[in-house]
Structure formats: C-alpha cells, structure tokens
Image (cartoon, rainbow, N blue to C red):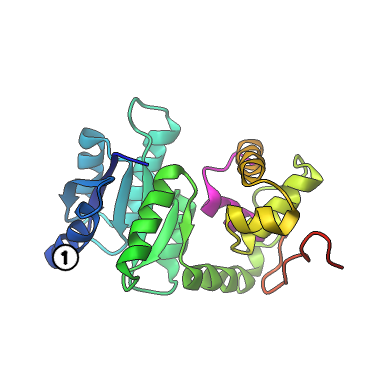
C-alpha cells in the first residue's frame, strides 16, 4: 500500500513530534497535518482529506470523541472526500471515553505505549478498512460489556447473516485476524474478506471494530466464551 495520508491530533507537542517522526520514516506514510484539539482536527481533516486520523481522546476544548463523531457523521453523509478512518490513541486500557469513541465511529484503538511497529501496522490496517483493536483494549471492552447488562440483547441483530457469516463474525469478535480465520475455517483469506464485507453491509456497520462491539452487544458472543473449534476438530 502507498500514499497513506495521516493527520495527528494530540494536545502534546512532544507526542505529535514523536508520532510524526515514526510515521514519516515509512515510505508509504505521510503526515499531512497536526492538530492540538478536536476542533482543529475536524477543520484540518475537512481541508486536507487524510486517510487516517490519529486522535487523542483527552483534548480541550473539543475532545477526541466529539471530533470522531463529527468526522464519521461527515463520512456517513457521503460528502466528497469526507471518508476518513479514525484511530483513537489512549493512555488507558479502557475508560468511558474509549467506550464512547467506539460508539461514535472510531475504527480502532491503540495504546500510547505501543511499540512503533505496532503503530505503523495499525495505521496501515485502518487505511485498508480492516480496523485495529489493541488486545488489551479488546479484553477491557469485553469486560465492559459484561459489566453492562443493560446492553445485553440490544443493538444490532444478525438474523440476516448466513451460518458461515455468523462463524466469521464470531471469530472476528474473538480477536482473530483474517488470516487466522481463514486457517480456522479452512477458507481462503480472500473468501474471509468477502464474508466480512457482506457482514458489514448487511448489518449496517462501518468496520471491524463496530462489528466486534455489536457481536457482544447483541449476545451473539458472550464475554469470556471460547471460540468455536477449528475446522476438522471436535
């Protein structure tokens, strides 16, 4: 993949400089702008049309959650050049703001103490539309759903999915990559991508992160439940 345009939004000048140095060192990544709060991030994103916005959660006067909501609202309105993926940066394993950002339309989460290679991989994955959830954040989100019984059985239902699509979604909700799902079910990776695209389209979801949240909210997958056995195993 080439030509991924990145906007960095963080209220710390040092953090922005460090992220920019890491990303600009990659031949396929270009930092096109920096913002120090959510309002500036929205303004720059509308003007510069980045592919990915690295968005800090805690900023003022507009925080990263509200900025994410505005940017994804722009995308849902299908405004020209408005489609942008938001990767949330957080110093916390999980908190209310992280949960709100997911519901606002964020495509993934990355902890600020992640290794540089993980940051680069996350940006590339988000740009592809694959989504990205830090494993620690995923586990915390699952715990969050378990601690919020009022959400059980609410939200998206998946009656429209085929049995195979349900199998794919269950494995996605357990944090499996497309390659892992392909091996798990004995399918080609391209087939898994097709199934996932159909799941998102049928369920009206933006990306992998929203699919995971919806799978737990709907009760399709229970917190702490094991994944189904791989194909060919009892």
In the image, residue 35 lies at what x, y percent? 17, 51
Name the element at disc 1: loop
Density class for disc 1 (Cα within 10 Å; few <14, some 14-19, many ≥20) is: few
Frontmost residue, 88 versus 152: 88
The answer, for residue 46, to whether it is visible in the render is yes
Q: Quadrant of residue 5?
A: top left
Q: Quadrant of residue 216?
A: bottom right
Number of dots carrying numbers: 1
Prevailing SS of the magenta stretch: helix
Magenta range is: 203-219
Residue 10 in magenta stretch = no
- The residue lying at 49 percent from left, 48 percent from top is 130
The answer, for residue 38, to whether it is visible in the render is no
Frontmost residue, 171 versus 190: 190
In the image, residue 208 lies at what x, y percent? 54, 50
**Residue underneath mark 1:** 12
Q: Residue furthest top?
A: 80
Residue 209 in magenta stretch = yes
Q: Quadrant of residue 42?
A: top left
């Amino acid at each position: 993949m080439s030509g991924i345009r990145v906007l960095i939004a963080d209220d710390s000048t040092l953090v922005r400089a460090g992220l920019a140095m890491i990303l600009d060192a990659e031949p396929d990544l270009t930092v096109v702008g920096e913002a120090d709060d959510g309002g500036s991030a929205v303004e720059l994103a509308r003007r510069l049309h980045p592919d990915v916005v690295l968005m800090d959660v805690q900023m003022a006067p507009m925080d990263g959650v509200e900025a994410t909501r505005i940017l994804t609202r722009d995308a849902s309105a299908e405004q020209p050049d408005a489609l942008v993926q938001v990767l949330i940066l957080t110093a916390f394993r999980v908190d209310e703001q992280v949960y709100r950002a997911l519901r606002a339309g964020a495509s993934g989460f990355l902890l600020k103490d992640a290794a540089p290679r993980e940051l680069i991989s996350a940006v590339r994955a988000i740009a592809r539309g694959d989504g990205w959830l830090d494993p620690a954040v995923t586990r915390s989100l699952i715990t969050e759903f378990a601690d919020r019984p009022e959400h059980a059985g609410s939200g998206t239902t998946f009656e429209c999915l085929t049995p195979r699509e349900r199998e794919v979604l269950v494995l996605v909700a357990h944090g499996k990559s497309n390659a892992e799902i392909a091996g798990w079910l004995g399918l080609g990776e391209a087939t898994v991508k097709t199934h996932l695209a159909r799941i998102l389209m049928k369920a009206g979801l933006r990306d992998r992160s929203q699919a995971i949240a919806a799978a737990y909210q709907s009760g399709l997958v229970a917190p702490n439940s094991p994944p189904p056995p791989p194909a060919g195993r009892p």
